[in-house]
Image (cartoon, rainbow, N blue to C red):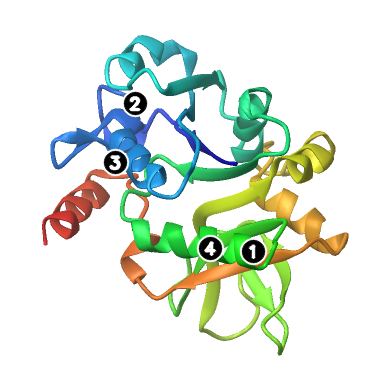
Amino acid sequence: MLIPVILAAGKGRRLKSEVPKPLVKVKGKPMIVHILRKVSSVCDSVNSIVVINPDFESDFRNVLDSNTILAYQDSPKGTADALKRALHLVPEGSEILVMYSDLILITEDSLKALAELHKSNCCDITFLSGVTETKFPYALVERDEYGKVISFKEKKIPDFPPPWEFYIGPIILRKDVVEEYIDNLIPNKDSGEIYISDIVSLSLIEHKSVCGFVTENQEEFLGVNTPEDLEIAEKLLSD
């Protein structure tokens, strides 16, 4: 079973909003609602898990339906830490689709292609990426001459000319693979956080099956972090 876990504990200070970032409205609906609608098209689970900051539980309860289960991350310790907070709610033997609440331009088509690749290739981990000539502060993906993923590094500065492949955000992981590595992750020396990309890196070292679907839609790179991003997202979703 594919279970959606939405990481939504960010406060969104750069958005200058009075509500947490996932509850900021785009086209009249909170971003978290847009994300839940998208993941419902690919996940066979009735329930969705949303990881939030417990300080805003009542705000989330006001917009989420009864099929949404809440997990809690009270301080920003990284994406892997947020996922860890939800693991006890995921049934054994399941696979997890992790989504970020601000990636509202990710399309249902890309999510379906991601899920299909994961299933058809029997992958342990499958991520969504894009190829670009623009540097993004995302995990850098490197492949060998046969297209096999050989490196997956958080915020690595490319040391080779473009085009570059970056991990955008959605990722499917087997629950048992997450459990194998989650307690052994080393916090980043600069941020003190642990990242989902570190799980991918360890999986590559131990020769797990790591697959990546490359989207050709450059709009999907946009995460809504600033008022300018919000304006762009509103326009693109209106076109």
Residue at (13%, 56%) from the top-left corner? 235
Pointer 4: what residue? 116
Label 2 environment density (alpha carbons within 10 Å; few <14, some 14–19, many ≥20): many
Q: Amino acid at mark 3?
A: His
Front label number (2 vs 1):
2
Front label number (3 vs 1):
3
Could you say whether the residue bearing mark 2 is in a helix, strand or loop? loop
Front label number (3 vs 2):
3
N-term-proximal mark, 4 vs 3: 3
Could you say whether the residue bearing mark 3 is in a helix, strand or loop? helix
Pointer 2: what residue? 20
Q: Amino acid at mark 4?
A: Glu
Could you say whether the residue bearing mark 1 is in a helix, strand or loop? loop
Pointer 1: what residue? 156
Q: Amino acid at mark 2?
A: Pro
Residue at (67%, 83%) from the top-left corner? 147
The quadrant in which the N terminus is found is top right
Q: Are marks 3 and 2 in contact (CB under 8 Å)?
A: no
